[in-house]
């Protein structure tokens, strides 16, 4: 039995494909009563049925278990759509290029939702030859710290693991980098898009308000 395949997901997919419970049952060689039990949470499909169910709905087993279908078949190959998962028990950081079902310490993890940097999580970026020097203004105590800094391009990720009582900084190759993300163990994931004319200079903008104003101007100029 697999507790992560819910009846709600099966029912939603069945109705999406305009199948009755009897029609779905016939495709899977089970009874319509069995399908009804799944959809009313009185039972779960046997693990041996996961692949046949996924085939009926033309999705992967991963999508079936997660309950999220991927409409764009190229999504998993696009680094800019990367997802990050962090275990609340051990702090394990996991990267995925597409939809995935991730578990750690018996917990099913959900992808972190990145927020814009703020006054409590200021990031400073400057160019040093062929690298970005990235620094996050943040205490690095054992209880409150930045656990990683990541850089995304369309075809590559560079991820730097950080540790408590260390420095919240990293050097990252400039080549094609479009976005910088970092993770605070208390406040979650933050991101910032790199902007031409701001982040490729050899000095950083330490004034957050000034940077925001420059971002708005760059958006108007470059779209």
Image: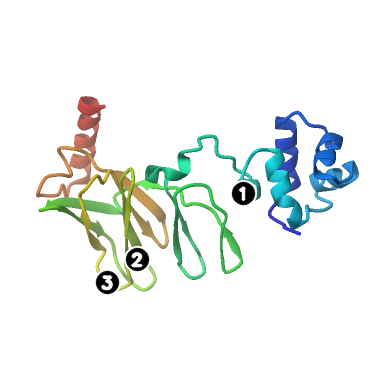
Q: Position of residue 215 (x, y in %)?
A: 23, 36
The residue drawn where x is 40% and y is 42% is 78
The N terminus sits in image quarter: bottom right
Residue tagged 1: 66
Q: Earlier in the sequence, mark 2 or mark 3?
A: 2
Give the secondary structure at mark 2.
loop
Q: Position of residue 17 (x, y in %)?
A: 72, 31
Q: CA distance from mark 3 to mark 1?
A: 36 Å
* Front position in the image: 83 or 124: 83
* Tag 1–tag 2 contact (CB < 8 Å): no
Position of 71 relative to 41 (above/below): above
Neighbour tally class for label 3: few under 14, some 14-19, many 20 plus, Cα within 10 Å: few
* Front position in the image: 63 or 166: 63
In the rendered structure, the answer to whether residue 83 lies left or right of residue 9 reads: left
In the rendered structure, the answer to whether residue 196 lies left or right of residue 40 reads: left
Image disc number at residue 145: 2
The residue drawn where x is 13% and y is 51% is 127
Residue tagged 3: 166
Query: Colour scheme used in the picture?
Result: rainbow
Q: Position of residue 223 (x, y in %)?
A: 26, 27
Position of 68 relative to 111 (above/below): above
In the rendered structure, the answer to whether residue 92 lies left or right of residue 11 reads: left
Q: CA distance from mark 2 to mark 3?
A: 9 Å
């Amino acid at each position: 039995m697999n507790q992560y395949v819910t009846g709600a997901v099966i029912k939603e997919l069945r109705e999406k494909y305009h199948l009755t419970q009897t029609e779905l049952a016939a495709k899977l060689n089970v009874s319509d009563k069995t399908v009804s039990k799944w959809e009313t949470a009185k039972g779960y499909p046997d693990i041996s049925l996961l692949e046949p169910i996924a085939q009926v709905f033309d999705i992967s087993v991963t999508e079936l278990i997660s309950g999220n279908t991927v409409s764009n078949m190229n999504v998993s190959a696009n680094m800019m759509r990367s997802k990050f998962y962090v275990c609340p028990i051990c702090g394990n950081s996991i990267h995925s290029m597409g939809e995935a079902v991730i578990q750690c310490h018996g917990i099913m993890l959900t992808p972190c939702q990145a927020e814009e940097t703020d006054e409590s999580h200021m990031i400073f970026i400057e160019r040093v030859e062929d690298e970005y020097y990235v620094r996050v203004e943040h205490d690095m105590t054992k209880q409150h710290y930045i656990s990683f800094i990541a850089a995304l391009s369309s075809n590559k990720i560079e991820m730097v693991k950080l540790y408590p009582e260390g420095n919240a900084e990293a050097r990252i190759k400039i080549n094609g980098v479009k976005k910088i993300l970092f993770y605070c163990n208390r406040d979650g994931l933050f991101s910032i898009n790199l902007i031409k004319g701001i982040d490729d200079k050899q000095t950083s903008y330490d004034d957050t308000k000034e940077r925001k104003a420059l971002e708005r101007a760059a958006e108007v100029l470059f779209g």
